[in-house]
Amino acid sequence: MPVSTTVNVFDPRIYAQGIPHETYRLLRDHDPVHWQEEHEVGDWPAGPGFWAVTRHADVVRVLRTPAEFSSWLGATQIRDPDPEDLSFIRRMMLNLDPPDHGRLRRIVSGVFTPRRVERFTAGIATRARLLIDEIAERGECDLPVDVTDDYPIHNLADLLGIPLADRGRILEWTNRVIGYQDPDHATVERGPDGRPVNPRSPAMLKDMFAYAHELAERKRREPADDLMTALATAEVDGQRLTDPELSMFFFLLVIAGNDTVRSALPGGLAALLGHPGEHRRLLDDPGLLDSAIEEMLRWHPPVLSFRRTAVRDVALGERHIAAGDKVVVFHGAANFDERRFPEPMRFDITRRPNDHVAFGDGPHVCLGAHFARLQLRTFYRELLWRLPDLRPAGPPERLVSNFIGGIKHLPLTYTPSPRLGAS
């Protein structure tokens, strides 16, 4: 039974209130592949509309079948890129289809390994401890502003080998690209025709790519034990990244690698603190931390949606999708699908199985998921038992975005704790 076209899962302002569970449930039950109008929002013009996919099985199918649902045809953001920018945007690994995607991913996976990432564990733990030291004696904090906005930036910069003096640029670039729908972050630049310039366009990313090229050249001259040196110099099966491919992967790491953890950390903690019984259960049994993190990711996926484009006419959820139609999967809807998760609105830190799609699925499953989980596990281990009576001091303030489930503010209170230092 099709649902009224007035149902809206597109408007980024909706997500500033949290995941729209009732709307998602309505769609999953009655119109799981729903035609969504794509109206004008603020400075951004209306689009042609898209199919909104909300059931777990359908989301997984879309993500696993690039022969039917392409990342390359129209890229992976809901809004259509400007036609003159599309060829540029298609170079990014995130926007490639097989076999090009597989070739590039093999090269990158050969150097971005769990073993390389694990070498940074001690430094990540020290950073978490020192950041928590800065707020421990206060008895109150705004977690994103005071702690978690900095944590993934510096971890990522250590991994890549970005000098300390340059690290502020990561937050600037991330807010420009990810926060463009949010009034607190948006800096709308207009082209000669008066239309807003896409933040992912070559013009808006020129400074980032120039920096990536300069950093790669520096690593070739002065190699170090970091990921950027490995990416700039290593060969995998006789193949190397070209300079444009390296710059695009730098963009992907700096933006996605930063903002995924930046969003997941406070969002997951807000979910845990919103369920005091499960919070106490975890404090009593630290061995549950890994499964608790998976439930936090299910409850608060850092990425809300991804777009594909139909390669050919195809049936999905009893709907006929025409070649060229936009198809958008909604992770927050899939993660609460009653057909896959018993009692999905119950927050359960021992939930098994827990095959959420917070890090995607299929050939584009998040390459940095291991690094993200390492940072989450390390941070929560340092925070939760250090400040065991954490409690919300107000509701979270969320990013205005239909793409990233960002948390801008999360006020907390707790009993003050003495500083520990780096040891």
Image (cartoon, rainbow, N blue to C red):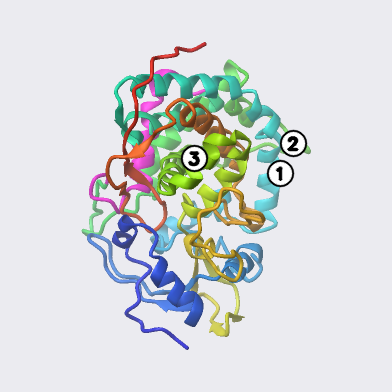
74 up-or-down from 148: above or below = below
Number of residues whose C-alpha sits closer than 10 Å to that of mark 1, classed few (under 14), some (14–19) or many (20 or more): some
Q: Residue at x 55, y 71 (%)?
A: 55
**Which of marks 1 and 3 precedes in the sequence?**
1
As rendered, which of 279 and 60 lies closer to the eye?
Answer: 279
Q: Cβ–Cβ below 8 Å for labels 3 and 1? A: no
Give the magenta part as a residue range. Answer: 161-185
Residue 122 sits in which quadrant? Answer: top right
Contact, mark 1 vs mark 2 (Cβ under 8 Å): yes
Label 1, label 2: how many angstroms apart (C-alpha)? 8 Å
The kind of secondary structure element at disc 2 is loop
Q: Which mark is residue 236?
A: 2
Mark 3 sits on what residue?
280
Residue that carries the numbered disc 1 in the rendered image = 106
Compare residues 384 and 132 and report the one nearer the observer: 384
Residue at 61 percent across and 66 percent down: it is 340
Where residue 159 appears, as percent x and y from the top left, is: 56, 27
Say which amino acid is labelled 1. Answer: Arg
Q: Looking at the image, is 92 positioned above or below residue 422?
A: below
Identified at 70% across, 56% down, the residue is 99
The Cα–Cα distance between marks 3 and 1, rounded to whole angstroms, is 42 Å
Q: Which mark is residue 158?
A: none
Q: Percent x, y for residue 239?
A: 72, 38
Residue depicted at 55% across the width and 78% down the height? 323
183 up-or-down from 174: above or below? below
Residue 81 placement (x, y as % from top left): 41, 60
Residue 110 among those drawn in magenta: no
User: Is there any visible trace of residue 291 in the rendered image?
Assistant: yes
- 180 drawn magenta: yes
Q: Is residue 201 left or right of residue 346?
A: left
Where residue 212 sits: x, y (%)?
48, 32
Q: Locate residue 48 relative to residue 42 in the image: left or right.
A: right
